[in-house]
């Protein structure tokens, strides 16, 4: 049974892996996190480490 409330699980995906075809290895870096749907209505953008790019990049929330 799922929890009821305002917190939802979101997926963060690397923006550089998705747009750059000449990257070091195949794949896209993805992280999961939670956010409060009432206080944060727009999509999140966080700096996270991408093992495919081997550096810190912007990860955006995807559906």
Image (cartoon, helix red, strand yellow):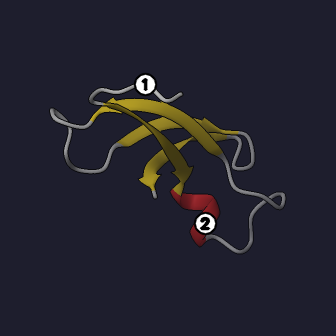
Q: Residue at x 46, y 56 (%)?
A: 62
For the residue pair 17 and 55, the one nearer the viewer reads as 17
- Which quadrant would residue 25 be assigned to in this image? bottom right
Residue depicted at x 42% and y 30%: 34
The label nearer to you, 2 versus 1, is 1
Numbered label attached to residue 18: 2
Nearest to the observer: residue 12 or residue 36 = 36
Instruction: State the residue in front, 8 or 21.
Output: 8
The mark found on residue 31 in the picture is none
Q: Which mark is residue 3?
A: 1
Q: Residues within 10 Å of mark 1 (few under 14, many from 20)?
A: few
Count of labels in the image: 2
Instruction: Give me the residue at 43% from left, 51% from top.
Output: 60
Badge 2 element? helix
Vertical comparison of 49 with 15: above or below: above
**Sequence-first tag of 2 and 1:** 1
Q: Residue furthest front?
A: 1
- Assign a secondary structure to mark 1: loop
Residue 41 image position (x, y, % from top left): 19, 45
Q: Residue furthest left?
A: 39
Q: Is residue 1 above or below residue 18?
A: above
In this view, 41 is above or below 7: below
Q: Residue furthest bottom?
A: 21
Gap between marks 2 and 1 measured at Cα: 32 Å
Up the image or down, 48 lies above or below 11; here it is above
> 10 Å neighbourhood of mark 2: few (<14), some, or many (≥20)?
few
Q: Position of residue 6 (x, y in %)?
A: 27, 30
Residue 38, x across and y down, in percent: 16, 35
In this view of the protein, which residue sits in the foreground, 57 or 8? 8
Residue 26 lies in what quarter of the image? bottom right
Residue drawn 46% across the image and 47% down it: 58
């Amino acid at each position: 049974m799922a929890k009821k409330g305002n917190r939802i699980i979101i997926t963060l995906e690397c923006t550089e892996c998705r747009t750059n075809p000449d990257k070091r290895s195949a794949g896209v870096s993805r992280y999961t996190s939670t956010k409060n749907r009432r206080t944060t209505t727009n999509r999140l953008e966080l700096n996270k480490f991408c093992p495919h790019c081997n550096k810190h990049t912007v990860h955006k929330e995807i559906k």
